[in-house]
């Protein structure tokens, strides 16, 4: 019953925040209602997009934290089991270099086997895949927020800057190629 109450609470606050965002958005769309100018005017007009992204980030963050907790739980459980196996196999305190090396080999073998089993398990793979997926979703939301802010400030987006870098790189290659051709022609001319 607890997850249902929690879901209702999350939905309530989600709808409440969207309601207030809609009110602010309506106010900012009227020039006489909001005295902002320049980038702040554009930012106020785009605030609904940012708020919506933040709400979705919070939902994805909950999922990310669940998968991250499970990830570290799996690692800690595997570590505990492996350490118990080591303690059973090598209960004596090593007294010389040979015993220390033997203890290290036992420790490495057991941990290697147990963690390999963990990493090969379907349960670990599924959880890790979901963890990475949620992380990518969070990154996507942050990129969307940054793009809205950059657009509000009348600045180029990351994609536009990347396009400029690609074009610069292409131009540098073309200039280097042309310079090489000019040098070759000069060598032929002087020879």
Image: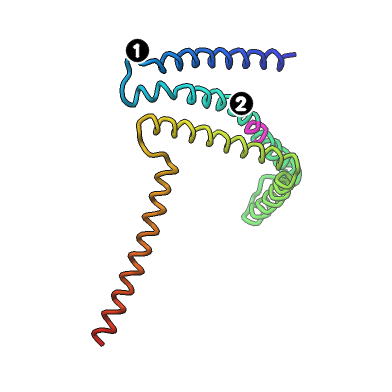
> What residue does disc 2 label?
62
Picture quarter containing residue 148? top left
Q: Is residue 114 magenta?
A: no
Mark 2 surroundings: few (<14), some (14-19) or many (≥20) residues within 10 A: few
130 versus 101 height, above or below:
above
Q: Quadrant of residue 176?
A: bottom left
Q: Position of residue 118 (x, y in %)?
A: 72, 44
Q: In 3D space, how far apart are the residues under numbered discs 2 and 1 (Cα atoms)?
A: 40 Å
- The N terminus lies in which quarter of the figure? top right
Task: Indicate the secondary structure of the residue bearing disc 1.
Answer: loop
Q: Which residues are magenta?
A: 67-71
In-image side of 182 versus 12 (left or right): left
Question: Which of these two is toward me, 140 or 36?
Answer: 36
Residue at horizontal 38 percent and vertical 29 percent from the top: 152
| Residue density around tag 1, few if under 14, some if 14–19, many if 20 or more, within 10 Å | few
The answer to whether residue 27 is above or below residue 67 is above
Q: Residue at x 56, y 12 (%)?
A: 16
Task: Using the image, tell me which numbered label, if any, was put on residue 92.
Answer: none
State the residue at coordinates (34%, 12%): 32
Q: Which residue is mark 1?
A: 32
Decide if residue 44 is on the left or right side of residue 138: left
Q: Is disc 2 placed on a helix, strand or loop?
A: helix
The location of residue 146, given as percent across then percent down, is 44, 33
Residue 120 in picture, x, y percent from top left: 73, 47
Q: Quadrant of the C terminus?
A: bottom left
142 displayed left or right of 86 = left
């Amino acid at each position: 019953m607890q997850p249902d109450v929690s879901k209702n609470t999350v939905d309530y606050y989600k709808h409440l925040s969207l309601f207030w965002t809609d009110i602010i958005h309506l106010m900012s769309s009227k020039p006489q209602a909001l005295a902002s100018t320049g980038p702040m005017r554009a930012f106020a007009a785009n605030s609904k997009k940012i708020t919506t992204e933040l709400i979705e980030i919070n939902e994805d963050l909950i999922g990310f934290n669940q998968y991250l907790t499970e990830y570290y739980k799996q690692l800690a459980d595997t570590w505990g089991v492996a350490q118990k196996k080591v303690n059973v196999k090598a209960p004596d305190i090593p007294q010389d270099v040979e015993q220390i090396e033997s203890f290290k080999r036992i420790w490495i073998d057991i941990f290697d086997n147990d963690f390999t089993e963990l990493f090969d398990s379907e349960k670990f793979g599924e959880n890790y895949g979901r963890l990475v997926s949620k992380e990518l979703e969070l990154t996507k939301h942050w990129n969307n927020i940054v793009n809205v802010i950059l657009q509000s400030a009348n600045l180029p987006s990351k994609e536009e800057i990347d396009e400029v870098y690609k074009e610069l790189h292409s131009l540098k290659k073309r200039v280097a190629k042309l310079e090489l051709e000019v040098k070759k022609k000069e060598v032929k001319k002087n020879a």
